[in-house]
Amino acid sequence: MSHERILVVDDEPQIRRMMRASLTAQGYFIDDACNGEEALEKLREEKYDLVLLDMNMPGIGGMETCRAIRESWDIAIVVLTVRNTERDKVAALDAGADDYVTKPFSMPELLARIRAALRRLPQSGDASSSPIQAGDMEINPATRRVIIRNKEIRLTPKEFDLLYHLASQPNVPIPHGILLQAVWGPDYGNEVEYLRVFVNQLRKKIEKNPSKPKFLLTEPWIGYRFNSPE
């Protein structure tokens, strides 16, 4: 049983009721909001571990709400939408979502996505959790902080996990599937667009020149490699 707090944001009352009943039965503490404005207000007042966010809402809309949440809170975000094209997935991930679920979905599928979004690396008590130094960057898994030239870089939980997993195996090409399963969980492996978006976000934050990265290198047809300066 889990005890994380989840905020369900959907304009349809019956969906909010169904989510509350199903997720409460799994041990989650549930609160809900009927639109983006109410969600942002509740986030300012309470602490949540994850937001389930419907993309198709009146008012400021799901995409704008997602961006607003990501700008202010390092919280897991799973978006729910009827759209299922790669362009829609990339847009949602680029707005700050950690994961993407297409309606209609089964409750076991949604629960798996929630667990994946709440997943954190490294595991507590990991003996290898000493800081990683790469050039002028320090990655500290114990505090989950990244410092570059004495300045802390704000990363989302998933961005940190992806960077840490790559940096913990320097100069080794890591295939897409292995990266996805390590960071998101064993149910993942084909969602290459997730990695593309998250690596681009990381490059914007940690690279001096994101278009010519020094740390996060693409291995064509394979995956990605963390280049650790000698």
Image (cartoon, helix red, strand yellow):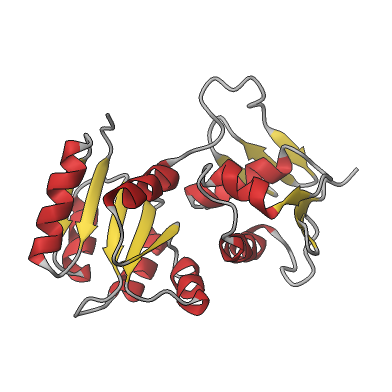
Rendered position, 160 above or below 105:
above
Report the side of 180 relative to 93 (left or right).
right
Q: How many marks?
A: 0
Q: What x and y, as percent, mark residue 44?
A: 23, 55
The one of 161 and 70 positioned closer to us in this rendering: 161
Q: Is residue 70 visible in this depiction of the protein?
A: yes
What residue is drawn where x is 13% and y is 54%? 18
Q: Quadrant of residue 128?
A: top right
Rendered position, 203 above or below 170:
below
Q: What x and y, as percent, mark residue 48?
A: 27, 46
What residue is drawn where x is 54% and y is 38%? 144
Picture quarter with the C terminus: top right
Report the side of 3 relative to 227 (left or right).
left
Q: What x and y, as percent, mark residue 195?
A: 61, 59
Rendered position, 171 above or below 88:
above
Q: Is residue 151 visible in this depiction of the protein?
A: no
Q: What x and y, as percent, mark residue 83?
A: 37, 76
Report the side of 71 relative to 179 (left or right).
left
Rendered position, 122 above or below 106:
above
Picture quarter with the N terminus: top left
What residue is drawn where x is 39% and y is 69%? 67
Looking at the image, the residue that sits furthest to the right is: 230
Q: Quadrant of residue 55?
A: bottom left
The one of 81 and 163 positioned closer to us in this rendering: 81
